[in-house]
């Protein structure tokens, strides 16, 4: 399956792994599954691992960010970490980050080359948001 959804072992965030080939429809189905998952609903935290996929085209980034803008309620207070290792993939992930943050200003997105750094940031950010909810 080109896009897999799985909870992190600690259930501190949901995880989406993208591998080639995949369609936009498969991506939207995966995003809907994430938004409905217990892990995501409890933490509003998501790791998107793109290390096994080629960079998305600018058109695909536009389509994905339009979809996410239409689902703003699902991203209202989200933390999203995107992992991409090559230069083009990292650049496209940064474009995605900027477009998501523009469309959904309350969403925190960060792009990483290292998965461990992405996980550490995601856990720290989601922890901050969780503690802010209980103040």
Image: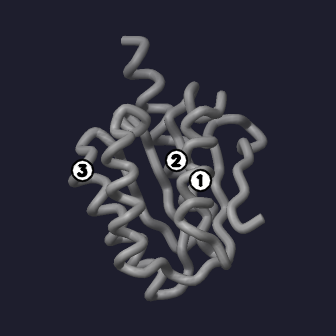
Report the quarter where the C terminus lies: top left
Asked if residue 45 is positioned above or below residue 63 in the image, the reply reads above
Image location of residue 68, percent across then percent down: 38, 49
Q: Are marks 3 and 2 in contact (CB under 8 Å)?
A: no
Label 2 – label 1 distance at C-alpha: 5 Å
Q: Earlier in the sequence, mark 3 or mark 1?
A: 3
Q: Residues within 10 Å of mark 2 (few under 14, many from 20)?
A: many
Please give left or right for residue 131 compared with residue 10 in the image: left
> Residue 76 occupies which quadrant of the picture?
top left
Q: Quadrant of residue 4?
A: bottom right
Asked if marks 2 and 1 touch (Cβ < 8 Å), the reply is yes
Residue visible at 33% across and 56% down?
66
Pick the front one: 124 or 61: 61
Q: Would you name the residue on which mark 1 appears?
A: 119
Look at the image and name its color scheme.
one colour
Binning the other alpha carbons within 10 Å of mark 3 as few (below 14), some (14 to 19) or many (20 upward) gives some
> What secondary structure is marked by label 3?
helix
Q: Which residue is mark 2?
A: 122
User: At x 78% / y 64%, what residue is drawn?
Assistant: 1
What's the CA distance linking mark 3 and mark 2? Answer: 20 Å
Q: Nearer the viewer, mark 3 or mark 1?
A: 3
The secondary element bearing badge 1 is classed as helix
Foreground of the two, 64 or 88: 64
Residue at the outermost bottom position: 87
Measured as percent of width and height from the top left, residue 121 is found at: 50, 51
Residue at x 46%, y 87% (from the top left corner): 87
Q: Does label 3 or label 2 sit earlier along the sequence? A: 3
| Gap between marks 3 and 1 measured at Cα | 24 Å
**Which label belongs to residue 103?**
3
């Amino acid at each position: 399956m080109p896009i897999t959804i799985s909870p992190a072992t600690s259930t501190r965030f949901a995880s989406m792994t993208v591998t080639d080939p995949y369609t936009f429809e498969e991506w939207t189905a995966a995003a809907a599954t994430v938004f409905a998952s217990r892990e995501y609903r409890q933490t509003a935290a998501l790791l998107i691992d793109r290390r096994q996929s080629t960079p998305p085209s600018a058109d695909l980034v536009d389509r994905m960010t339009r979809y996410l803008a239409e689902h703003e309620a699902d991203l209202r207070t989200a933390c999203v970490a995107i992992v991409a290792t090559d230069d083009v993939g990292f650049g496209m992930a940064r474009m995605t980050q900027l477009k998501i943050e523009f469309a959904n200003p309350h969403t925190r997105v960060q792009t990483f080359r290292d998965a461990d750094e992405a996980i550490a940031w995601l856990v720290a950010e989601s922890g901050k948001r969780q503690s802010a909810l209980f103040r």
